[in-house]
Image (cartoon, rainbow, N blue to C red):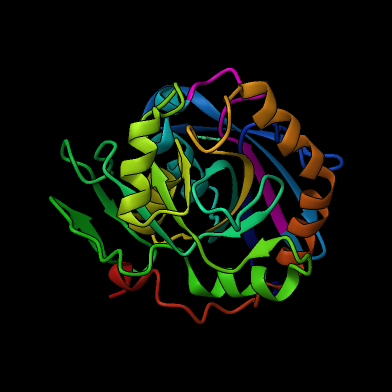
Amino acid sequence: MNQPLDKVCVIGGSGFYDLLPSPKEVMVTTPFDKIPVHVLEQDINGRRIFFLPRHGGKHSIPPHKINYKANIFALYKLGVKRVLSTNAVGSLNEAMKPGDYVILNDFIDFAFPITFFEDGFEITFNSGKKLSGVIHLDMSEPYCPEVRNSILKTIETKNSHPNGSYARTMGPRFETKAEILAIKRWGADVVGMTNPSEAILSRELGICYATIAVVTNYAAGLQKELSHQEVLDIFNSRLKELKILFFDIIKNLPVEHGCNCARHIKN
Ligand code: HPA
């Protein structure tokens, strides 16, 4: 009997709007939006790879308007088990320079609460386990160690950092200098406007999630001024390499899951 295909999704950030060479479009309806989520899919090397640009096709959705719940629920409905995401970030750590990659291992998120488990949401997972009501998830290790390991094994460039802590701000504006000073004192290495929402919601649905952050600038006060164009330009300069890297990482993902990210949805 044929095994079901292992399903992996790449979520693209600012400046990353396509990945797959000849994708099929899939529209997924969810309880979280009237508009279906638009995902691209293609089978490559025995895996079904999905691509979801979080800001829409041409950066049409600002960070605070991204429907994270619809996006992640759509991936769950499609049977995605692992997500590799990328985010443009500002750096607070001198060693993490524009153009560098940071493989996130932690985050600080005091921006806004996000969870599927509100408003009577109830879900029965394939394991038969039902979850509803209020849940408080363990976030001691918010990114999947196994997916992170595949990234670390694959990434060869010297411009990459194996660990980094991401602080999320609400956006869409960049931060003030005082905010960056405060965030630096908290111990974050990089700052961005999106990532933890996806990491949290993925974990709630038992989907493994890990991120390659791309440093596009030093954060406010650590360089003269900030512009969205600079973020896009630096991200773009990394895009070709990043796309190849994503395919190589996916090749290196073990087929069997050895991590514990989905423990709360097992029976
Ligand atoms: N701050 C917040 N988000 C960002 C930045 C930044 O400096 N650079 C890229 N995304």
**For the point 67% across and 45% down, which residue is it?**
98
**Quadrant placement of the N terminus:** bottom right
Q: Nearer the viewer, residue 135 or 142?
A: 142
Q: Is residue 265 above or below residue 189?
A: below
Q: Is residue 36 above or below residue 21?
A: above
Query: Viewed as shown, does residue 174 lie left or right of 216?
Result: left
58 is within the stretch colored magenta: yes
**For the point 52% across and 21% down, which residue is it?**
61
Q: Nearer the viewer, residue 29 or 164?
A: 164
Residue 172 visible to the viewer: yes
Q: Main secondary structure of the magenta part?
A: loop
Q: Residue 163's spot in the image, x, y percent?
A: 53, 66
Q: Nearer the viewer, residue 177 or 165?
A: 177
Q: Residue 225's spot in the image, x, y percent?
A: 57, 24
**Quadrant placement of the C terminus:** bottom left
Q: Is residue 15 above or below residue 113?
A: above
Q: Which residues are magenta?
A: 48-62
Q: Is residue 237 above or below residue 243?
A: above
Query: Viewed as shown, does residue 215 lie left or right of 251?
Result: left
Query: Viewed as shown, does residue 156 lie left or right of 261?
Result: right
Query: Viewed as shown, does residue 219 lie left or right of 120?
Result: right
**For the point 78% across and 65% down, which residue is it?**
157
Residue 5 visible to the viewer: no
Q: Quadrant of residue 173?
A: top left
Q: Nearer the viewer, residue 2 or 47?
A: 47
Count of residue discs: 0
Q: Residue 266's spot in the image, x, y percent?
A: 32, 73
**For the point 60% across and 58% down, which residue is it?**
95
33 is within the stretch colored magenta: no
Name of the residue lying farthest toward the left: 133
Q: Residue 177's spot in the image, x, y percent?
A: 40, 31
Q: Quadrant of residue 137?
A: bottom left
